Image: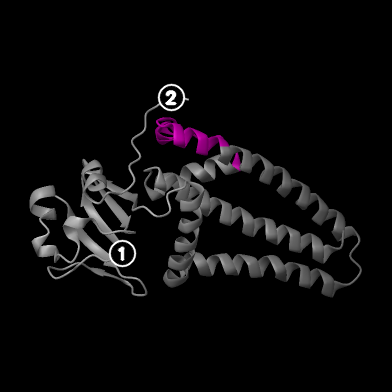
Amino acid sequence: MNIIVAFALFALIVLLYWVISELFTILFRFTGLPYGKARFQVTSILTGCGFTTRESEMLLTTKSRRRLARVTMLFGYVFNITVVTTIINVFLSLKEMQEAKDFLLAIVIPLVVVAFIIVFVRVPSMRMKSDRLLEKIAGKMLKIEGVNTMVILDHIGRNAIVRITLVEVPEAYQGVPLAWSGLKEDKNILVMLIEKQGKGMRQANAETKFDPGDRITVLGDYRTISETFNARENFESDED
């Protein structure tokens, strides 16, 4: 195998590995796992390191998470074999290298891919766009497109910080300013941030109104939030 092709293949695998990791993290987030816990568990499964904590038990609490964990394991197994095979090919290609410029060009390809990933991870606007794209893909995979979805961002005591994507605004809140919605008084749900389509995230205020396509960040009881915004619940406890 030509050294440039070998390094290009390695770079492609690294890029795919990152995409798969992000996608499975979002899929687990759709099942109710907070972002940090979902990312850690996906990394642990994909790398096959076998590192476990009490948090790993959360993956066994629902049927959807168990199925998703099995699929993640299969992807991790296939990718690990592919990575090892590609690395071997890279080293074999080094022996066939004839010109230094070929080696330099081959090195540049993975560096470009790494730089590309860093840009998407570190630049907020790019991160937001990539998250939206991956969430759409994840939504189709879980067959939840066309419904309001919610993702846990963190826990504070018994309450959860939840981000909701509104496909449809509940009838009770259509055209109603936040001050008159009764969310805080009646539901004990605090609307903290709102992101309108094509605009950045900003603080919600008394005049804030919900529109289809909005992404709102709220604090409250997870089940109450789910019922209030007609968002997809993930409280399954059924057995396989």
Helix, strand or loop at disc 2?
Answer: loop
State the separation of the CA atoms marked 1 and 2: 35 Å
Q: Is residue 55 magenta?
A: yes
Q: Which residue is mark 1?
A: 212
Give above or below for 158 relative to 180.
Answer: above
Q: Are marks 1 and 2 in contact (CB under 8 Å)?
A: no
* In this rendering, position of residue 132 left or right of residue 225: right
Q: Main secondary structure of the magenta part?
A: helix
Q: Which residue is mark 2?
A: 239
**Amino acid residing under circle 2:** Glu
* In this rendering, position of residue 168 left or right of residue 186: right
Q: Is residue 49 visible?
A: no
Tell me the magenta residue range: 47-70
The dot on residue 161 is none
Residue 203 rendering spot, x and y as whole percentages: 22, 68
Helix, strand or loop at disc 1?
Answer: loop
The answer to which of 33 and 96 lies nearer the viewer is 33
Residue 75 rendering spot, x and y as whole percentages: 62, 43
Q: Nearer the viewer, mark 1 or mark 2?
A: 1
Which quadrant of the view contains residue 109?
A: bottom right
Few, some or many C-alpha atoms within 10 Å of disc 1 (few <14, some 14-19, many ≥20)? some
Q: Is residue 203 visible?
A: yes
